[in-house]
Amino acid sequence: MADDTELTIALAEYEHLRELSRTVHDQSTARLTFFLAVASGATAVSAGLITTGGPGGRLAPAMAAGLGLLVLLLGVFVFARQIELNDRGRRYAVAATVLRTYLARRAPALSPFIVMPTLDDPGPFAPEPFHRHWFRDLVSQAGMIALVNSALLGLAATLGMLLAGPAWLAALVAAVVATTSVAVHLRVIRRRVARSAALVGTVLTTRPLTPAPSHTPPAPSPRVG
């Protein structure tokens, strides 16, 4: 068996990866919750301003439009940050899988009892593939933010077209704008996932992932005579 120093370093690195993964998960969840809360609050305030008509005149629609613009700007920033956090989380997961592979190869007798994925055996909890169906990206945390952003853009297009054309044209333009926005958001998500997959693939193919044999000092040769 390899020197205990190697095992100590591997376990410490694995624990560090667990902490990093937990931090990324907590930050992602907190940002999504904050954004949804702000969007819901802005929607409620805007609906109240428009339906009650106060403060009167054209001030209420202007205030509602301003709230929508602020939520949209916040959505763009949160979306970009969410993509970054998701990318880190995926790479941390790969790093943890590589370390589990090292630990499993150190003790082959324990391999059947390791159910978390390794490079040799994905197990029942196989990690999510980098290349996946577009719908999976759409229902992710970043995808939910993309849907809210696209809905706001579609609503803005509807209000703008209602001032200059018939309702059917406004609905058509809103559908085109919202669909295009969703497609652009998904394109950004999938490009980032593909770039991360390429980076991980390069690292895994250029590193020797076989534990080096332990270096034990040679036994002293017996004295002659």
Image: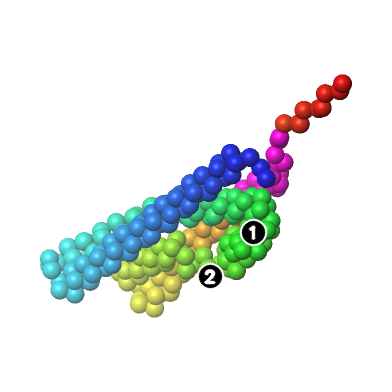
Where disc 2 sits, the SS reads helix
**Mark 2 Cα within 10 Å, few/some/many (few <14, many 20+)?**
few
Mark 1 and 2 residues: CB-CB less than 8 Å, in contact?
A: no
Residue drawn where x is 54% and y is 55% of the image: 93
Q: Nearer the viewer, residue 37 or 207?
A: 207
Left or right, 8 with reference to 78: right
Q: Nearer the viewer, mark 1 or mark 2?
A: 1
- Residue type indicated by callout 1: Leu
* Span of residues in magenta: 198-216
- Residue 5 drawn at (x, y percent): 58, 39
- Residue 168 drawn at (x, y percent): 39, 78
Any magenta on residue 211? yes
Cα gap from disc 1 to disc 2, whole angstroms = 37 Å
Residue drawn where x is 32% and y is 71% of the image: 162
Q: What residue sits right under mark 1 in the picture?
A: 110
- Residue 214 drawn at (x, y percent): 70, 39
Where disc 1 sits, the SS reads helix
On screen, residue 103 above or below 176? above
The N terminus, quarter of image: top right
Q: Residue furthest right?
A: 225
- Residue type indicated by callout 2: Phe
Q: Nearer the viewer, residue 66 or 117?
A: 117
Q: Residue furthest bottom?
A: 168
Which mark, residue 135? 2
**Mark 1 Cα within 10 Å, few/some/many (few <14, many 20+)?**
few
Q: Nearer the viewer, residue 175 or 95?
A: 95
Q: Nearer the viewer, residue 154 or 21?
A: 21
